[in-house]
Image: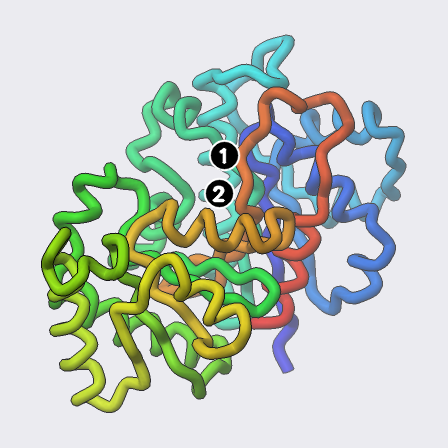
């Protein structure tokens, strides 16, 4: 049996990524449950500084074998908590190096990512807006899927980093049908082959048959076609109830129509244990689903629970 390989990126050096990665690596319960080859991709200087600040001690094997020192531009003397082009470039370089490592054996590899900052990426001239787009570009993967999982609730996203007005324009019969097909296939690759998918509505009460919104008609047409192809899917289901119904077991996954619709549901259920998946890449990617938290960067107060869960779920589905 091939070894499972997990590549962890430390995210933007100015954020809480370095702290939560080191805390996760020092967590005894996490280390005991892992049966994988782990590599941490980041700046060794950043990690050593953070290790010293946290009072954590790691052996030579961690620094020489687990940590992959990824080069980047010189960092500002006082970088924690501040947006900078240098940190944005570092964050991109870590992702690029981790993806290259995973591509050596994609079927047995997962990339686990700490948070990055979109302003810092833009300042660095990185031509991508976020992790999903970066990894899609680096692996030549068309329109990768985003899925959140927390406490058994799985949520996919029809649209991601676009304005709400743009998201409404993207709610089309063909796009929804394509996502039903691809989300079902992605779940199957994770070993989830049974279960019903629900497609969320958009408008209050699913538009009341067009009284205040017609987007649900696109959902109805897509679901009808999907059912005729043999997919176990229903919709539209009222957005005020669909996530609760999935939480109690009525549905095994939900296709959310826009970014915040699904984010609010999962993060309200359990903020720290909401884990983001990118599916449709050659390898599995999981991530914490919180930001860089510049306001607490370097203050030793960041929780590593989400990072620990992201690593555990990566191992579970590999």
Return the residue at label 2: 95
Q: Quadrant of the C terminus?
A: bottom right
Between 265 and 45, the one nearer to me in the picture: 265
Numbered disc in front, either 1 or 2: 1
Residue 293 drawn above or below residue 84: below
Residue 219 drawn above or below residue 230: above
On the image, the x and y values in percent for residue 160 come to 31, 47
On the image, the x and y values in percent for residue 288 come to 57, 47
Relative horizontal placement of residue 197, taking residue 74 as reference (left or right) = left
The quadrant where residue 145 appears: bottom left
In the image, farthest residue toward the top: 77
Q: Dot 2, how many residues are within 10 Å of its Cα: few (below 14), some (14-19), or many (20+)?
A: many
* Residue 318 seen in the figure: no
The type of colouring in the image is: rainbow
The quadrant where residue 315 appears: bottom right
Mark 1 secondary-structure assignment? loop
Q: Residue at x 41, y 53 (%)?
A: 262
On the image, the x and y values in percent for residue 229 come to 19, 88
Between 222 and 241, the one nearer to me in the picture: 241
**Mark 1 vs mark 2, CA separation in Å:** 10 Å
Q: Residue at x 49, y 76 (%)?
A: 190
Mark 2 secondary-structure assignment? helix
Residue 318 drawn above or below residue 19: below
Which of pointers 1 and 2 lies earlier in the amino acid sequence? Answer: 2
Q: Quadrant of the N terminus?
A: bottom right
Relative horizontal placement of residue 282, taking residue 128 as reference (left or right) = right
Q: Residue at x 35, y 24 (%)?
A: 122
Q: Are marks 1 and 2 in contact (CB under 8 Å)?
A: yes
Q: Dot 1, how many residues are within 10 Å of its Cα: few (below 14), some (14-19), or many (20+)?
A: many
Return the residue at label 1: 116
Q: Residue at x 56, y 36 (%)?
A: 11
């Amino acid at each position: 049996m091939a070894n499972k390989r997990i590549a962890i990126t430390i995210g933007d050096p100015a954020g809480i990524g370095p702290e939560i990665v080191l805390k996760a690596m020092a967590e005894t319960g996490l280390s005991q449950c892992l049966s994988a080859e782990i590599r941490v991709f980041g700046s060794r200087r950043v990690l050593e500084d953070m290790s010293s600040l946290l009072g954590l001690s790691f052996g030579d094997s961690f620094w020489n074998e687990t940590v992959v020192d990824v080069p980047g531009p010189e960092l500002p003397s006082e970088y924690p908590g501040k947006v900078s082009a240098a940190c944005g470039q570092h964050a991109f370089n870590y992702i690029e190096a981790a993806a290259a490592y995973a591509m050596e054996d994609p079927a047995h590899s997962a990339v686990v990512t700490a948070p990055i900052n979109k302003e810092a990426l833009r300042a660095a001239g990185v031509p991508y807006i976020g992790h999903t787009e970066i990894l899609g570009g680096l692996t030549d993967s068309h329109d990768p899927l985003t899925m959140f999982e927390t406490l058994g609730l799985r949520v996919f996203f029809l649209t991601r980093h676009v304005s709400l007005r743009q998201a409404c324009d993207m709610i089309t019969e063909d796009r929804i049908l394509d996502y039903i097909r691809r989300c079902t296939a992605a779940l199957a690759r994770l070993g989830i082959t049974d279960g019903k998918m629900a497609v969320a509505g958009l408008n209050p009460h699913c538009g009341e048959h067009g009284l205040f919104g017609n987007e649900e008609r696109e959902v109805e047409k897509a679901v009808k076609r999907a059912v005729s192809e043999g997919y176990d899917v229903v919709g539209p289901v009222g957005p005020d109830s669909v996530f609760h119904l999935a939480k109690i077991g009525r549905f095994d996954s939900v296709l959310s129509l826009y970014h915040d619709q699904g984010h609010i549901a999962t993060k309200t259920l359990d903020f720290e244990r909401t884990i983001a998946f990118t599916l449709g890449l050659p390898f599995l990617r999981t991530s914490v689903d919180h930001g860089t938290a510049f306001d607490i960067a370097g203050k030793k107060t960041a929780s590593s629970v989400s990072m620990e869960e992201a690593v555990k779920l990566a191992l579970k589905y590999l």
